[in-house]
């Protein structure tokens, strides 16, 4: 089942793949391949200091764990210490793992889909946009059903949790060490619920509401968004005009006012050219930019300030 018998000591600087059962109840039947990458422990893996793999998931669902470790693996190793392997994996169905979920038959088709999303977002704000978004989601669901019907039933959080146990065991360890962000917090808590005696250390970070997620409500994920934005306004006021373009003597709420009145009325888009990029900035684009920058406090200042 596992390729790790021979690969365990290899330094991975390119992704490798590992076989897992597509259906854990039928392990002899079809397989899936999970793409993995690793920043190996700096200590000798034969020494008593070696503590084995720490697995990562940074959310989505659908984010590539291999890309995460390619980008941040060295930082995680610095934070956690030399005794751990830092292991990223593309969850089953995602990016380099196969069979791969795709609702689109070519990358052009995918790009056209994404482009239309942007167009529709720019047309209007308010209920029409929401109605369009809902219809597009329904359309994507139909595509999924038509085009990925055979594999989608196997691509879920509990199978991904089982894969994490397989990866851990393939390293010669029986208990999971894990650090998950956002949806990764749901994956981590699902693992803990399924395998409570197989957890060594588990960190859930940027915690998402697992019950809301499994109910497919997604009702609670925006609850504190305005509070997070308020932190930006407060910080803008405390660091002063030389460091924050939205600073105003009259206090933090003025920054809010200037951001929201920037493009309204009459909410007309205006052209922006900052070689080599160019495009139209409008109220929706501004809102999306603000919203996505709230994911990370460090991202706020360069994009907003
Ligand atoms: C393997 O899966 C197929 C469906 O993909 C099923 O028809 C078959 O019965 C399964 N075989 C075993 C041994 O479980
Ligand atoms: C670790 O131990 C194994 C088996 O005893 C050996 O084959 C391997 O070369 C050792 N690795 C290192 C880095 O010393
Ligand atoms: C996995 O295998 C079990 C046992 O054969 C079967 O009951 C179940 O439906 C299969 N899961 C999927 C998603 O096909
Ligand atoms: C910013 O101003 C808008 C409009 O007055 C208000 O609805 C919103 O709550 C304010 N945001 C924050 C974070 O204070």
Image: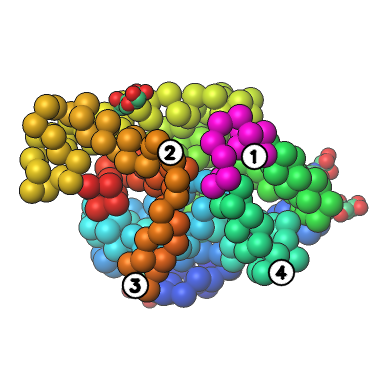
Element type where label 4 sits in the image: loop
Residue for point 37% across, 42% down: 263
Q: CA distance from mark 4 to mark 3?
A: 30 Å
Element type where label 1 sits in the image: helix
Q: Which residues are magenta?
A: 121-133
Residue 278 to residue 120: above or below: below
Dots 2, 4 in contact, CB < 8 A? no
| Residue 36 in view here | yes
Discs 2/1, front: 2
The residue singled out by tag 2 in the image is 266
Number of residues whose C-alpha sits closer than 10 Å to that of mark 1, classed few (under 14), some (14–19) or many (20 or more): some
Discs 4/1, front: 1
Dots 3, 1 in contact, CB < 8 A? no
Residue closest to the eye, 168 or 69:
69
Dots 4, 3 in contact, CB < 8 A? no
The residue singled out by tag 4 in the image is 106
Residue for point 54% across, 36% down: 125
The residue singled out by tag 1 in the image is 133
Q: CA distance from mark 2 to mark 4?
A: 39 Å
Residue closest to the eye, 54 or 197:
54
Residue 233 to residue 53: above or below: above
Residue 244 to residue 1: above or below: above
């Amino acid at each position: 089942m596992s390729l790790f018998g021979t690969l365990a000591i290899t330094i991975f600087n390119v992704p490798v793949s590992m076989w897992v059962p597509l259906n854990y109840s039928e392990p002899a039947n079809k397989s899936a391949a999970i793409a993995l990458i690793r920043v190996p422990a700096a200590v000798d893996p034969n020494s008593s200091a070696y503590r084995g793999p720490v697995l990562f998931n940074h959310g989505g669902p659908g984010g590539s764990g291999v890309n995460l470790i390619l980008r941040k693996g060295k930082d995680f190793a610095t934070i956690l210490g030399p005794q751990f392997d830092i292991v990223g994996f593309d969850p089953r169905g995602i990016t380099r793992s196969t069979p791969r979920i795709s609702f689109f038959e070519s990358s052009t088709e995918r790009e056209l889909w994404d482009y239309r999303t942007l167009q529709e977002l720019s047309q209007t704000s308010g209920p029409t946009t929401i109605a369009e978004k809902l219809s597009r989601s329904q359309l994507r669901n139909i595509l999924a059903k038509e085009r990925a019907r055979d594999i989608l039933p196997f691509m879920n959080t509990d199978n991904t949790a089982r894969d994490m146990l397989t990866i851990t065991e393939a390293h010669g360890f029986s208990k999971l060490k894990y650090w998950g962000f956002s949806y990764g917090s749901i994956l981590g808590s699902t693992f803990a619920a399924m395998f409570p005696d197989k957890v060594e250390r588990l960190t859930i970070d940027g915690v998402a509401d697992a019950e809301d997620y499994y109910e497919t409500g997604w009702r609670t994920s925006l609850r504190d968004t305005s509070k997070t934005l308020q932190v930006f306004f407060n910080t803008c006021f405390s660091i002063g005009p030389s460091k924050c373009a939205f600073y105003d003597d009259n206090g933090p709420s003025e920054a809010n006012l200037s951001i929201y009145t920037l493009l309204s009325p009459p909410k007309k888009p205006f052209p922006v050219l900052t070689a080599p990029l160019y495009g139209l900035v409008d109220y929706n684009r501004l809102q999306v930019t603000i919203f996505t920058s709230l994911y990370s406090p460090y991202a706020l200042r360069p994009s907003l300030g």
